[in-house]
Image (cartoon, grey):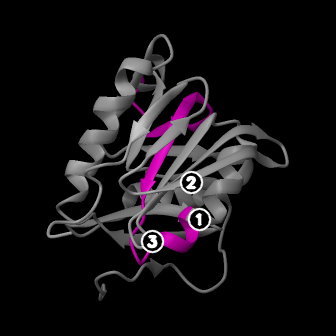
Amino acid sequence: MTLMAERPLISGTEPRGDFEELLGLLDELNVPNGYKAEIVRGSIVVSPWSKGYYRRVMRLVCSQLEPHLPEEHVIERSPFLYVFPEHERAFGPDIHAAHERVFETTSTHLDGEALSLVAELTSPSTRSEDLTDKVGVYAKAGVPVYLILDMQERQAVVYGSPSGKGYELRLSKPFGEKLDIPEPFGCTLDTAGFLPPGD
């Protein structure tokens, strides 16, 4: 198997098998170092891990949001796979906040409905899914806050007030400005420090 940097590898061109089969395949997949795997639109997608400076950005996001977490929720940057069986998706977000009980399992498949926040830092290979498919899935699953740090456009976009039709709230600010994060966080995110080295 050949993997190209900044290009996702999708298992086939047409969705195959049911969601449980795909989850089983994902568990058995030997993902090369430097890559992660998700289930997007009925296919297994393998994409490269983040650029080095993304760590700084993720740390800044977590340190600002942690004091505003809902009760008994934790915020993580560790790779975990959240499943959305109703939507036949499984995502491994860059940053995620969820009720601490979701981690009390021996399974590698965590309940996506336990999430209170998801944040994605876009890369050229995953940006399209972060801006489209994931917005709809997270909203319909009732994830209260979806934060997209668009590293290519250098702006932060936050969605809130999820419903069965999508998110009812969308706010955006260029990096360097402050962005209001909706409930249940109800705080402000300072995006100073989100630009790449040298900018």
**Residue located at (36% from left, 18% from top):** 67
Of the pair 127 and 90, the residue shown nearer to us? 127
- Pointer 2 and pointer 1: residues touching (CB < 8 Å)? no
Residue 186 in which image quadrant: top right
Circle 1 SS class: helix
- Sooner in the amino-acid sequence: mark 3 or mark 2: 3
Task: Point out residue 69 in the picture as x, y percentages from the top left corner.
Answer: 45, 20
Task: Point out residue 177 in the picture as x, y percentages from the top left corner.
Answer: 41, 49
Amino acid type assigned to the residue bearing label 1 in the image: Leu
Query: Which residue in the protein does label 1 denote?
Result: 131
Badge 2 local density, few (<14 within 10 Å), some, or many (20+)?
Answer: some
Is residue 88 shown to the viewer in this render?
no
**CA gap, disc 2 to disc 1?**
13 Å
Amino acid type assigned to the residue bearing label 2 in the image: Ser
Q: In this rendering, which labeled residue sits more in front, label 2 or label 1?
A: 2
Q: Is residue 7 above or below residue 18?
A: below
Q: Is residue 179 above or below residue 195?
A: above
- Pointer 3 and pointer 1: residues touching (CB < 8 Å)? no
**CA gap, disc 3 to disc 1?**
12 Å
Please give the label number shown on residue 172: 2
- Sooner in the amino-acid sequence: mark 2 or mark 1: 1
Residue 152 inside the magenta-drawn segment? no
Is residue 101 shown to the viewer in this render?
yes
Badge 3 local density, few (<14 within 10 Å), some, or many (20+)?
Answer: few
Circle 2 SS class: strand
Query: Which residue in the protein does label 3 denote?
Result: 153
The residues colored magenta run 105-130
Amino acid type assigned to the residue bearing label 3 in the image: Glu
- Sooner in the amino-acid sequence: mark 3 or mark 1: 1
